[in-house]
Image: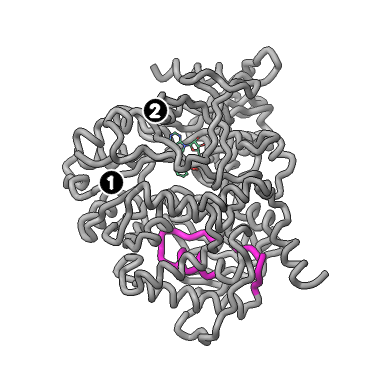
């Protein structure tokens, strides 16, 4: 096998490709423009060189300065021996180095995995293992957590991992390189095409482990350009980035990439508290911000408690990631006089937006309409039969920026996609006569905790490993701030010295934490039961368990 054939084989391993007729169609319609993310970035730099791309703490970085740092870091990576098709797990808070690492690794054909700061060693080592990543990039600490301890765990578990780069005090790991000392050699741009996978997004998941979502240059950039247009971003846009930069919402809907495409300025917030963010909004005259409903509720509360009415300065507040309650939507529009845009999207692809010129009722009560006329949407019953217009059912979708399969997940893909390539979103929706989607619920076994997704099975597997647990069931319980929290129902084995499960409650939380799962996956509440309720098919009846929680909260 030639070198070229070897790299091609590596680049397509574990990837489900778009069928040729769809490729042709998406190219013919101009969605897929054959541009790689590196070329896209170069174009932005050429157009907006002297403008400010990023404001991070006291640092203002122009597009040209960002490009220079990206090139130097790409040279550094190439000198370390990284090659086309190698993977790197990037887990950074909202700091400029995220973009340097992201664009530089893509420049040399590496494929970054978009880990979130909340992930812990169970998730991160899984991402490293799945992609055989050679490099992991993290910050020393964020929100009180020391990522070097996580790096140590991953190093002992992941044989592929060769290098860890830590921003801040690196301890025994490699420090982020002083870029001014990198020999400024010309970096050979990787021989990849826009049809290749550029990087991996992560799925919230509904089964055991989070799945990797392979996004190609072509498909991703189409969603970015189209989103920037829908959101009407331009050179005067100043966008505050509060949600984690790596999340699909933050990166592409329209997010930082949409903003760079339009030549605007990105203001990075290290943490989402109203105190920090309101000050940034004021200082930098922020025009756009994207929030999850839980954060929007917190901000509204802070405003009520006397903080300055920050919404007066903002042009657009985007809210997405979880269902925005109508009352909160109304409050945002009416009390705070801001232009609200609902965003209903998924890392797998499909994104819907309410449009600025939609009626107030549409903006308040729907989650918007698709980006593309070629986003195919089907609403079906349990037997995959399409439902009459206006009825609620399972949302299936296929289109120019929706994946055809998760990475290296053949078995799971058979369930998550129909035979003709529609992605089963797991969302229960209905469509209004004018094409707007209303999210009514969910059929997937997932909890949406203020926008952070918990695959219940992943947590149940960990709980079930505890010696005193016979079986467990994790279900959503209503929460007025987060929308949903998690409650674990535990059928437990009594122990003589602890007839009441007082100690077990604490032990189980510790057990989940020690397993290395993200902290948001630790059950918020635990209920001990003598036995589980069952469905006619003998499965644990989660509906009944949810009902019990709703009854108890009334
Ligand atoms: C975004 O992406 P993910 O991958 O973290 O989560 C996707 C899931 C959707 O399938 C749906 O269950 C839920 O999150 N969701 C919403 C929603 N936006 C997402 N549920 C109700 N209302 C909404 N507005 O969360 C994401 C990706 C790109 C843009 C925006 C959000």
The residue at the point 51 percent across, 86 percent down is 184
Quadrant in the picture for the C terminus: top left
Instruction: Name the spot of residue 46 as percent of width and height, x first.
Output: 40, 72
The local secondary structure at tag 2 comes to loop
Q: Which of the two residues, 159 or 469, is positioned nearer the viewer here?
A: 159
Instruction: Tell which residue pokes out farthest to the top in this image.
Output: 536
- Residue 526 lies in the magenta stretch: no
Q: Which of the two residues, 500 or 16, is positioned nearer the viewer here?
A: 16
Instruction: Name the spot of residue 374 as percent of width and height, x first.
Output: 52, 41
User: Mark 2 or mark 1: which comes first in sequence?
Assistant: 1
Q: Which of the two residues, 96 or 165, is positioned nearer the viewer here?
A: 96
Instruction: Name the spot of residue 270 as percent of width and height, x first.
Output: 37, 58
Vertical placement of residue 72 versus 386, above or below: below
Vertical placement of residue 376 versus 388, above or below: below
Q: Which residue is mark 2?
A: 434
Q: Nearer the viewer, mark 2 or mark 1?
A: 2
């Amino acid at each position: 096998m030639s070198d070229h054939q070897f790299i091609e084989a590596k680049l397509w391993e574990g990837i489900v490709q778009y069928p040729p007729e769809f490729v042709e169609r998406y190219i013919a319609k101009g969605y897929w423009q054959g541009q790689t993310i590196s070329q896209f970035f170069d174009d932005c730099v050429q157009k907006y060189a002297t403008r400010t791309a990023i404001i991070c703490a006291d640092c203002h970085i122009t597009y040209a300065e960002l490009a220079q740092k990206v090139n130097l870091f790409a040279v550094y990576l190439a000198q370390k021996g990284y090659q086309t098709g190698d993977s790197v797990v990037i887990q950074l808070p909202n700091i400029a180095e995220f973009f340097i690492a992201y664009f530089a690794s893509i420049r040399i054909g590496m494929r970054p995995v978009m880990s979130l700061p909340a992930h812990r060693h169970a998730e991160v080592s899984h991402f490293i293992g799945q992609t055989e990543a050679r490099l992991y990039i993290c910050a020393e600490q964020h929100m009180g957590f020391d990522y070097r301890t996580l790096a140590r765990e991953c190093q002992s578990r992941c044989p592929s991992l060769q290098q860890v780069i830590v921003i801040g005090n690196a301890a025994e790991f490699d420090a982020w390189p002083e870029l001014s000392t990198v020999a400024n050699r010309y970096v050979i741009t990787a021989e990849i095409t826009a049809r290749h996978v550029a990087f991996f997004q992560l799925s919230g998941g509904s089964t055991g482990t989070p799945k990797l979502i392979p996004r190609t240059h072509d498909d991703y950039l189409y969603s970015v350009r189209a989103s920037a247009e829908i959101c009407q971003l331009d050179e005067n846009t100043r966008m505050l980035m509060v949600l984690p930069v790596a999340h699909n919402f933050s990166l592409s809907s329209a997010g930082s990439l949409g903003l760079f495409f339009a030549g605007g300025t990105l203001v990075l917030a290290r943490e989402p508290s109203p105190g920090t963010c309101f000050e940034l909004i004021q200082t930098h005259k922020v025009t756009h911000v994207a929030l999850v409903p839980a954060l929007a509720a917190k901000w509204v509360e802070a405003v009520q408690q006397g903080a300055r009415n920050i919404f007066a300065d903002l042009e657009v507040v985007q809210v997405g990631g979880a269902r925005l309650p109508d009352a909160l939507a109304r409050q945002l529009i009416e009390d705070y006089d801001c232009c609200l845009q609902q965003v209903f999207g998924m890392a797998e692809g499909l994104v819907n937006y309410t449009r600025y010129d939609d009626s107030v009722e549409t903006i308040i009560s729907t989650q918007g309409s698709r980006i593309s006329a070629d986003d195919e949407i089907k609403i079906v019953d349990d037997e995959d039969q399409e439902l009459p217009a206006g009825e609620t059912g399972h949302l299936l979708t296929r289109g120019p920026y929706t994946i055809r399969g998760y990475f290296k997940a053949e078995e799971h893909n058979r369930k998550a996609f129909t035979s003709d390539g529609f992605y089963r979103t797991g969302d229960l929706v209905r469509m209004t006569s004018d094409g707007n989607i209303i999210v009514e619920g969910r059929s997937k076994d997932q909890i949406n905790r203020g926008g952070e997704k918990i695959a219940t099975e992943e947590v149940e597997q960990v709980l079930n490993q505890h010696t005193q647990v016979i079986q467990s069931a994790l279900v959503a319980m209503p929460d007025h701030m987060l929308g949903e929290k998690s409650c674990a129902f535990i059928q437990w084995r009594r122990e003589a010295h602890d007839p009441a499960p007082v100690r077990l409650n604490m032990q189980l939380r510790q057990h989940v934490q020690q397993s290395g799962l993200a902290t948001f996956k630790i059950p918020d509440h635990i209920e001990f039961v003598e036995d589980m309720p069952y469905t006619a098919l003998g499965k644990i009846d989660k509906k009944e368990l949810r009902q019990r929680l709703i009854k108890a909260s009334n």
